Image: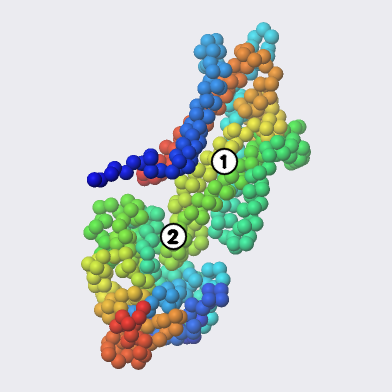
Amino acid sequence: MENKIEISDLKVNYGDKPALNGISFNIVQNEILGIIGPAQSGKTTLLKVINRTLEFTHGVTIQGSVKLDGVDISTIGDVYGLRKRIGMVLPLPVGLPLSIYDNVAFAPRTSGIRIKAELDEIVERCLKQAALWDEVKDRLNSLGTRLSGGQQQRLTIARALSHQPEILCLDEFSIAVDPITTMRIEEVLKTLKNEMTILLVTNLVQQAKRLADRTAFMLNGDLIEIDDTEVMFSDNPKQQSTFDYINGDFG
Amino acid sequence: MNKQPNKTSNRPFSETIIELFIRLCGISSIIFVFGIFFFVFKEGASFLFNGLNIWEFLTSEEWYPTSLNNKRYGTLALILGTFSVTTLAMLMAVPFGLGAAIFVSEFCSPKLRETFKIVIEFLAAIPSVVWGFIGLTLMNQLIILVFNAPIGLTMLNGSIMLALMSVPIIVSIAEDALKAVPDSYREAAEALGATKWQVIYRVLLPAAKNGLLAAVLLGAARSIGETMAVLMATGHSVNIPTSPLSWIRTLTATIAAELGEVARGGEHYQVLFIIGILLFTITFIVNLIADLVIKGIRQS
């Protein structure tokens, strides 16, 4: 198995406040890596370091290295190109104030695709992948922000898929989605795994158990443990706190 | 037995007083608008319906209100003066104002932004007569020098002054509108690999368009209504404008310059009030168009 991302000794501070205290681990090509842990443990920060949106925030310092396919991402000159290789789904759905069609066509258009037929095809494919096509195919020109919370979340997933990313980061995608839709998206993720590497940050430990090949447990900016999901969810993971968190004893 | 709660008797007396006061404030704004309209209309009404040739008033360029044997009240030159100087001012102020707003809201560091906002607010507080003074002296000579014009008190001079006056208004309102766009939109667009400029023109500008339009229209309203600076900077000469170097006269400046010297209640006096009604109508139409445009944007 090949490493898609190699993170070594990654430290992040917001001003004086540490968010990540030097974590190291690898993400394997075509796996679903579940990242669990309570709030404020640095999960979202980690995703923002990977797609390099964090470093432009005021007062943030980042140390350590993140390698994508063996290349340190901080040496990549075309940061926009890097971001296009990574699909990002944020916890609260953000439908851009554009039509449903334009939301999905946004990223392809920014990379210069202008041909209508090509865009049509991308929009349809992505909306189908995100299990939203049947609900919106007759009103692609209405505003994306008018959709319900769950539909908007699937719209952001469709949008994240629109530039055919190599890595898909999902940051607690099921917060605003009902259980049945969550199940449908989870099925989609299982098939997408064949085409891309998936990082699944989730508050629902059971979701990690259902989907993830491996699971990482983070706490207060430290990586406590990373292992095969079966091991993590067994009766004897290496760390006691992992067992306690997964079994609901804290957090 | 169930007691019906009695709204008025249970309420403390101070509540009632405060509500009454706030109600009065609200109603008074409506009363003032109608009151002003009524007063202006009343002063001009008798000549407007009895004696004034409205067609000639709007389409003739001959403004000779003080002629001894043939008084003519044509305001075409004044209307064109107001419109041309405002349009030219907006052509300069809108790109500059929106550009500055985008810079302050999207590219500035927080520290620089605070400085900028203070400077811009200071600029907005400069009285218009000071701008007129600058137009009369500095800009006058600059225009003579640059364009080799015989006189620098021109439409160009007036519109530069108007632009300088409207830019702070446009900047501060447009900047508020851009700042009101949630950061999550910026993050989402950036995560999709959009460049800074793509984020601005594909996401921020569409999301803030109502506020930006309001900024432009308030800037335009400031220009149309401005009196003192254009009176001093445009030459104040009745003339159909043919180029930015024409000297012109505006509707507002005419009222300001002539009202003090006319006999109260006379024809000329009444015509000046009819010009007031005309200005009222123009601003009403501008506001109406703005409302319709904003509603149209909301529905689409």
Look at label 1 and name its amino acid.
Gly
- Name the subunit of mark 1: B
Give the labeled residue for mark 2.
B185
Give the labeled residue for mark 1.
B219
Residue B116 image position (x, y, % from top left): 63, 55
Residue furthest to the top: B69
Q: Quadrant of residue A126?
A: bottom left
User: Between residues B39 and B50, which one lies in front from this camera angle?
Assistant: B39
Q: Residue at x 47, y 51 (%)?
A: B208
Left or right: where does residue A64 sit relative to residue B140?
left
Residue furthest to the front: B1
Q: Residue at x 55, y 13 (%)?
A: B47
Left or right: where does residue B18 sit relative to residue A201?
right
Q: Quadrant of residue A217?
A: bottom left
User: Between residues A37 and B201, which one lies in front from this camera angle?
Assistant: A37
Image disc number at residue B199: none
Quadrant of the frame with the N terminus of chain A: bottom left
Mark 1 is surrounded, within 10 Å at the Cα level, by few (under 14), some (14 to 19) or many (20 or more) other residues, namely many
